[in-house]
Image (cartoon, helix red, strand yellow):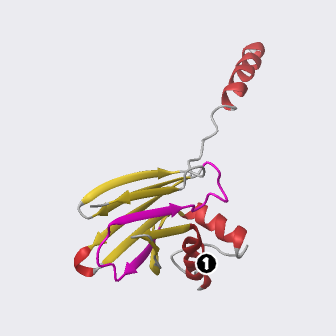
Amino acid sequence: MKSFKYLFILAIIPLMAFTVAHKYYVSITQVEYVKEKQSVQVITRIFVDDLERLIRMRYDETVTLAANNESEKVNQYIDKYIGEKMVITINGKPSKMVFLGKEYENDIVYCYFEIEKVASIQSFEIRNQVLFDVFPEQKNIVRTDINGENKSFVLVKQNDKGLLNFK
Protein backbone atom coordinates (compact mmCIF):
# COMPACT_ATOMS: atom_id res chain seq x y z
CA MET A 1 0.00 0.00 0.00
CA LYS A 2 2.87 2.35 0.83
CA SER A 3 4.45 1.81 -2.57
CA PHE A 4 1.13 2.59 -4.27
CA LYS A 5 0.93 5.96 -2.50
CA TYR A 6 4.53 6.67 -3.43
CA LEU A 7 3.90 5.86 -7.13
CA PHE A 8 0.66 7.88 -7.09
CA ILE A 9 2.46 10.95 -5.72
CA LEU A 10 5.29 10.56 -8.26
CA ALA A 11 2.74 10.39 -11.09
CA ILE A 12 0.61 13.34 -9.90
CA ILE A 13 3.37 15.90 -9.17
CA PRO A 14 4.57 16.20 -12.80
CA LEU A 15 0.97 16.53 -14.01
CA MET A 16 0.29 19.33 -11.54
CA ALA A 17 3.20 21.30 -12.96
CA PHE A 18 1.25 21.71 -16.21
CA THR A 19 -2.03 22.80 -14.67
CA VAL A 20 -1.01 26.39 -13.89
CA ALA A 21 -3.65 28.70 -15.36
CA HIS A 22 -2.46 30.80 -18.27
CA LYS A 23 -3.46 34.45 -17.95
CA TYR A 24 -4.70 36.24 -21.03
CA TYR A 25 -3.96 39.92 -21.43
CA VAL A 26 -6.63 41.63 -23.48
CA SER A 27 -8.57 44.88 -23.64
CA ILE A 28 -11.58 45.71 -25.77
CA THR A 29 -12.20 49.19 -27.13
CA GLN A 30 -15.51 50.11 -28.75
CA VAL A 31 -15.51 53.18 -31.00
CA GLU A 32 -18.80 54.59 -32.26
CA TYR A 33 -19.36 57.65 -34.41
CA VAL A 34 -22.65 59.37 -33.60
CA LYS A 35 -23.15 61.69 -36.56
CA GLU A 36 -26.18 63.48 -35.06
CA LYS A 37 -24.09 64.54 -32.05
CA GLN A 38 -20.91 65.04 -34.11
CA SER A 39 -19.23 62.84 -31.54
CA VAL A 40 -16.93 59.84 -31.45
CA GLN A 41 -17.61 57.80 -28.33
CA VAL A 42 -14.91 55.48 -27.03
CA ILE A 43 -15.36 52.82 -24.35
CA THR A 44 -12.32 50.84 -23.26
CA ARG A 45 -12.71 47.72 -21.13
CA ILE A 46 -9.66 46.60 -19.19
CA PHE A 47 -9.23 44.02 -16.44
CA VAL A 48 -9.06 45.84 -13.11
CA ASP A 49 -6.01 43.94 -11.85
CA ASP A 50 -4.05 44.67 -15.05
CA LEU A 51 -4.83 48.39 -14.93
CA GLU A 52 -4.11 48.52 -11.21
CA ARG A 53 -0.72 46.88 -11.77
CA LEU A 54 0.08 49.43 -14.47
CA ILE A 55 -0.91 52.41 -12.28
CA ARG A 56 1.13 51.06 -9.37
CA MET A 57 4.19 50.58 -11.59
CA ARG A 58 3.96 53.98 -13.30
CA TYR A 59 2.40 56.38 -10.84
CA ASP A 60 1.62 55.27 -7.30
CA GLU A 61 2.48 51.97 -5.57
CA THR A 62 -0.26 52.44 -2.97
CA VAL A 63 -3.23 52.79 -5.34
CA THR A 64 -6.04 50.26 -5.26
CA LEU A 65 -8.77 50.35 -7.90
CA ALA A 66 -12.13 49.98 -6.23
CA ALA A 67 -15.63 51.31 -6.62
CA ASN A 68 -15.53 52.68 -3.06
CA ASN A 69 -12.86 54.67 -1.20
CA GLU A 70 -10.65 55.06 -4.26
CA SER A 71 -7.99 57.76 -4.50
CA GLU A 72 -9.14 60.80 -6.44
CA LYS A 73 -5.92 60.57 -8.45
CA VAL A 74 -6.99 57.33 -10.15
CA ASN A 75 -9.03 59.19 -12.78
CA GLN A 76 -6.06 61.46 -13.50
CA TYR A 77 -3.77 58.45 -13.90
CA ILE A 78 -6.21 56.68 -16.23
CA ASP A 79 -6.76 59.82 -18.32
CA LYS A 80 -3.04 60.49 -18.61
CA TYR A 81 -2.04 56.91 -19.41
CA ILE A 82 -4.75 56.13 -21.95
CA GLY A 83 -4.31 59.57 -23.48
CA GLU A 84 -0.65 58.71 -24.12
CA LYS A 85 -1.17 55.12 -25.23
CA MET A 86 -4.33 55.43 -27.33
CA VAL A 87 -4.08 57.96 -30.14
CA ILE A 88 -6.93 58.52 -32.58
CA THR A 89 -6.43 60.39 -35.85
CA ILE A 90 -9.53 61.50 -37.76
CA ASN A 91 -9.22 62.77 -41.33
CA GLY A 92 -5.44 62.94 -40.92
CA LYS A 93 -5.54 65.09 -37.75
CA PRO A 94 -4.83 63.92 -34.19
CA SER A 95 -7.96 64.09 -32.03
CA LYS A 96 -8.26 64.99 -28.37
CA MET A 97 -10.11 62.40 -26.31
CA VAL A 98 -11.93 63.80 -23.30
CA PHE A 99 -12.08 61.46 -20.31
CA LEU A 100 -15.69 61.26 -19.11
CA GLY A 101 -15.23 58.78 -16.29
CA LYS A 102 -15.16 55.12 -15.44
CA GLU A 103 -17.18 52.41 -13.77
CA TYR A 104 -16.49 48.94 -12.46
CA GLU A 105 -18.36 45.78 -13.33
CA ASN A 106 -17.03 42.64 -11.68
CA ASP A 107 -13.36 42.45 -12.67
CA ILE A 108 -13.58 44.94 -15.57
CA VAL A 109 -13.15 48.71 -15.55
CA TYR A 110 -15.05 50.60 -18.25
CA CYS A 111 -13.29 53.84 -19.24
CA TYR A 112 -15.38 56.39 -21.17
CA PHE A 113 -13.96 58.96 -23.59
CA GLU A 114 -15.41 61.30 -26.20
CA ILE A 115 -14.09 63.22 -29.18
CA GLU A 116 -16.31 66.21 -29.86
CA LYS A 117 -17.04 68.33 -32.93
CA VAL A 118 -16.48 65.65 -35.57
CA ALA A 119 -18.61 66.73 -38.55
CA SER A 120 -17.64 63.75 -40.74
CA ILE A 121 -15.14 60.92 -40.97
CA GLN A 122 -13.33 60.10 -44.20
CA SER A 123 -10.42 58.33 -42.47
CA PHE A 124 -9.99 56.91 -39.00
CA GLU A 125 -6.75 55.65 -37.49
CA ILE A 126 -6.21 54.29 -34.01
CA ARG A 127 -2.94 53.43 -32.30
CA ASN A 128 -3.63 51.43 -29.16
CA GLN A 129 -0.58 50.58 -27.05
CA VAL A 130 -2.50 50.16 -23.79
CA LEU A 131 -0.65 47.79 -21.43
CA PHE A 132 2.00 46.81 -24.00
CA ASP A 133 4.63 48.28 -21.65
CA VAL A 134 3.54 45.92 -18.85
CA PHE A 135 2.45 42.79 -20.72
CA PRO A 136 4.31 42.05 -23.99
CA GLU A 137 1.67 39.46 -24.96
CA GLN A 138 -1.18 42.00 -24.54
CA LYS A 139 -3.82 42.11 -27.27
CA ASN A 140 -6.05 45.13 -27.78
CA ILE A 141 -9.24 44.44 -29.68
CA VAL A 142 -10.78 47.49 -31.34
CA ARG A 143 -14.36 47.38 -32.64
CA THR A 144 -15.65 50.30 -34.66
CA ASP A 145 -19.06 51.47 -35.81
CA ILE A 146 -18.32 54.38 -38.14
CA ASN A 147 -20.50 55.61 -41.00
CA GLY A 148 -22.67 52.52 -40.70
CA GLU A 149 -19.71 50.14 -41.13
CA ASN A 150 -18.62 47.73 -38.42
CA LYS A 151 -14.93 46.78 -38.45
CA SER A 152 -12.61 45.13 -35.94
CA PHE A 153 -8.87 45.08 -35.36
CA VAL A 154 -6.69 42.97 -33.09
CA LEU A 155 -3.70 45.11 -32.22
CA VAL A 156 -0.50 43.66 -30.79
CA LYS A 157 2.80 45.20 -29.76
CA GLN A 158 4.33 44.58 -33.20
CA ASN A 159 1.28 45.95 -35.03
CA ASP A 160 -0.40 48.61 -32.89
CA LYS A 161 -2.33 50.62 -35.52
CA GLY A 162 -5.56 50.18 -37.42
CA LEU A 163 -6.66 52.39 -40.34
CA LEU A 164 -10.04 52.76 -42.00
CA ASN A 165 -10.84 54.85 -45.07
CA PHE A 166 -14.35 55.87 -46.05
CA LYS A 167 -15.54 57.29 -49.38
Residue at label 1?
77
Residue nearer the viewer, 35 or 104: 35
Q: 16 left or right of 2?
A: left
Q: Quadrant of residue 72?
A: bottom right
Q: Nearer the viewer, residue 65 or 139?
A: 139
At a point 55% along the width and 74% down the height, the residue shown is 83
* Viewer-side residue, 2 vs 142: 142
Residue 123 position, x and y percent, is 37, 64
Q: Is residue 118 magenta?
A: yes
Q: Is residue 119 magenta?
A: yes
Q: Position of residue 89 (x, y in %)?
A: 45, 69
Residue at the image point whose x is 43% and y is 52% from the top? 153
| Residue 107 seen in the current view | no
Q: Quadrant of the N terminus?
A: top right
Residue 89 shows in the view: yes
* Residue at screen point 65% across, 51% down: 136
- 8 left or right of 47? right
Q: Amino acid at mark 1?
A: Tyr
In the image: residue 20, left or right of residue 127: right
Q: Position of residue 148 (x, y in %)?
A: 23, 61
Magenta-tinted stretch: 110-137
Element type at mark 1:
helix
Residue at (29, 56) in percent of width and height? 150
Q: How many dots with numbers?
A: 1
